Image (tube, rainbow, N blue to C red):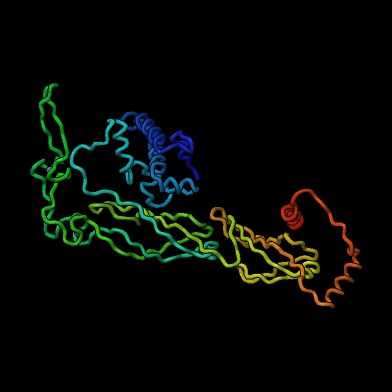
Amino acid sequence: MATDYYAVLGVRRDASPDEIKKAFRRLARELHPDVNPDPKTQERFKEINAAYEVLSDPQKKQVYDLGGDPLSQAGGGGGAGGGFGGAGFGNFSDIMDAFFGTSQQRGPRSRTRRGQDAMIRLEIDLNEAAFGTTKEIQVDTAIVCATCNGEGAAPGTSPQTCDMCRGRGEVSQVTRSFLGQVMTSRPCPQCQGFGTIVPTPCPECAGDGRIRSRRTLTVKIPAGVDNGTRIQLAGEGEVGPGGGPAGDLYVEIHETAHSVFQRRGDDLHCTVTIPMTAAALGTKVPLDTLDGTEDVDIRPGTQSGQSVPLHGRGVTHLRGGGRGDLIVHVEVQTPGKLDAEQERLLRELAKLRNEERPTGQFQPGQQGLFSRLKDAFNGRS
Ligand SMILES: [Zn+2]
Ligand SMILES: [Zn+2]
């Protein structure tokens, strides 16, 4: 990732939303093109806008904190190129705020506003997470009303200029107070500040300019996604009021548990139980890996707790290619019920190995599994 948005705004990674906002306002005042038209400064102004766009939006911030760049994808809400513009609605009022100490807008407000982001959960299995897949998902979101093209007016009619405010969206009033005459403005009560009136609302969307609809989307899931990974689909969220630009859709990945493999990062772990004799003599055990059946090579003299890594048989790394390992942990089973013949043979073996009265090796504490695991890794790889 190229840009450190926290550094751009000069805040710590654990900065509160309020600190982020303050840092942005301070820089916006300093670097605004109207104040400082130097091209280098303008570039920097774009940067702080992009940084603020990400860090002021909880969802984008989360994507960024998880290592993604919410602005890097096509149309990703303004994008790095047009950091100030596109989706800068949120930013814009904050810039007004920075300059005028108020976010009150002048003139009529637009009926068109950006829609909200939407989120959908998607369950995939380990195989799909490891190698990537393409999924069709059904989404229920607001789309532009086709009957009125988002205008909100019934076909054949159109919004009309409000006669109370003459389209200004606000009405002024002179009041007398002990300070003298004071002029105050407030949003026009007849048009709610829009400056226009829709005399006949569209019957399809009741004047909202959008309707709910179910769509099918095809989502490409990259190899290496994990539980909680969010995939951003720019402009596939909710269309805004008045047919405003759509928010983004986030697809959150949920990986279903596998019957044999447990995933830790990009490595997979499983345990195989083998009889004592096989551990002593060595054997090959077939295992259904993600890449088909492979033999796990249990070497002669394998101890309980040792593990056998199958290199590159884990999950694909999301970034940078390559794959994790599949690690098979070995558990040796001591035979329980012995019949007379088996007991005789084992006693004979013990005698041959001088193990009839073992003294044992005592060590402090509980060393077993941990030290054996360490030894096993060092010995094997
Ligand atoms: Zn409509
Ligand atoms: Zn009005």
- Residue at (17% x, 45% y) in the render: 194
**Among all residues in the image, which is located at the extreme left?**
163
State the image quarter where residue 101 is shown. top left
The quadrant of the rendered image in which ligand 2 is seen is top left
Q: From this viewpoint, which residue is outermost toward the top?
A: 179
Q: Report x, y in % for residue 67.
A: 50, 48
What residue is drawn where x is 48% and y is 55%?
Answer: 228
Q: Image check: 250 left or right of 147? A: right
User: Where residue 378 sits: x, y (%)?
Assistant: 75, 53
Frontmost residue, 334 versus 200: 334
Task: Tell me: 131 left or right of 41.
Answer: right
Q: Quadrant of residue 47?
A: top left
Q: Is residue 79 visible?
A: yes
- Say which of 367 and 153 sits in front: 367
Residue 278 left/right relative to 149 = right
Asked if 25 appears above or below 196 in the picture, the reply is above
Residue 56, percent from left and from top: 39, 41
Q: How many marks?
A: 0
Instruction: Name the foreground residue: 161 vs 16.
Output: 16
Q: Is residue 371 left or right of residue 76?
A: right
Q: Is residue 77 above or below residue 350?
A: above
Residue 290 image offset from top left, x and y in percent: 59, 67
Quadrant, the C terminus: bottom right
Does residue 43 show up?
A: no
- Rendering quarter of residue 278: bottom right
